[in-house]
Image (spheres, rainbow, N blue to C red):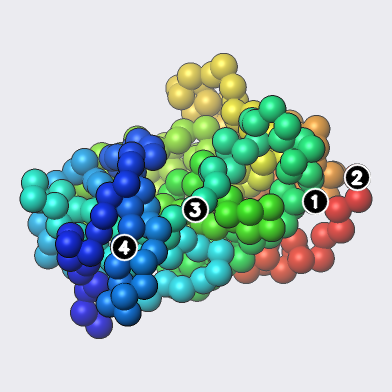
Amino acid sequence: MDTKMILKDNLQFIERIGQGKLGVVLKAFYRTKQNELLTVAVKKLDLKFHYHDILKDVNVLQEIKHPYILQFFGITIHTDRSILFIMEYAPMKSLDDCLISPNAKREYTVQILFEFIKQIAAALSYLEKRFFIHQNLTCRNYLVFNKSLVKLSDWSFGHLNASWKERLKLPIAWMSPEAIHSHCFSIASDVYSFGVSMWECFSYGQVPWQGMTNDQISEVIDASNYQQLPRPSHATSELYQLMLHCWKYEPCERPTFSELEMTLAEVDIII
């Protein structure tokens, strides 16, 4: 399959909508080959690459199609040799922004949040079957489309070239012990992070291990001093047990995303 290159002439930039760890995010219109006008998000990576360095990875990315994963349309090479990733545009905010909004508990009930978590688990189960590792599972990477739909974002950047990926600053508070101490990333380390994002979700946007430095967090989840986050006030005991399962110290003892997807489908939320 040919890499999907998008001509710059087919993009009309509207406004800057954010600044992420990878670079600036822009809102734009994209005119497709079918003459359809789409609103898209354009991520301009600050890091500089050669096109051929990511050719293989981008070919894989464009094959990913799932209702709960942000769609990847293609790339454009900027005049400064930076790469523009053209992605589906989410009309609302990231889930972490929604969780800390003034009316969050009324607008985003526990039942709604539970449906969001099930959708993300389904997306990760899909990626798991394709051996994708995300490496950055936090609620800021779950994009809300409406109150019945959320999609996983930044799934593509965990898969790309490791030589530059290591330069990114990853969120220590969401990371597994082996990812922190040994830089060992896997499906199992993603499961650990997913459990922390569940905690973040059902605590309505609280920061895990709030007030601790990265070194302190590293110490409290170390094997000799292994601690776990307390049960969020809006999580049922069944959901918290699932989080604890995700946080098993040994990666082999954690569930897979396929297992999590099936387990969540059987959970009844009674508040």
> Can you tell which mark lies on residue 30?
4
Residue drawn at 61 percent across, 66 percent down: 122
Tag 3 or tag 1, which sits nearer the N-term?
A: 3
Which residue in the structure is indicated by mark 3?
90
In which image quadrant can residue 171 be found?
top left
Tag 2 or tag 3, which sits nearer the N-term?
A: 3
Distance (Cα) linking label 4 and label 3? 14 Å
Kind of residue at badge 4: Tyr
Tag 2 or tag 4, which sits nearer the N-term?
A: 4
> Can you tell which mark lies on residue 111?
1
| Residue 137 position in % (x across, y down) | 51, 47
Distance (Cα) linking label 2 and label 1? 9 Å
Whether residue 191 is visible: no
| Left or right: where 178 falls relative to 104 | left
Contact (CB < 8 A) between labels 2 and 1? yes
Q: Nearer the viewer, mark 4 or mark 3?
A: 4
Contact (CB < 8 A) between labels 4 and 2? no
Could you say whether the residue bearing mark 4 is in a helix, strand or loop? Answer: strand
| Residue 162 position in % (x across, y down) | 26, 53
Kind of residue at badge 1: Gln
Residue drawn at 79 percent across, 45 percent down: 110
Q: Nearer the viewer, mark 3 or mark 2?
A: 3
> Can you tell which mark lies on residue 184?
none
Residue extending farthest to the top is 211
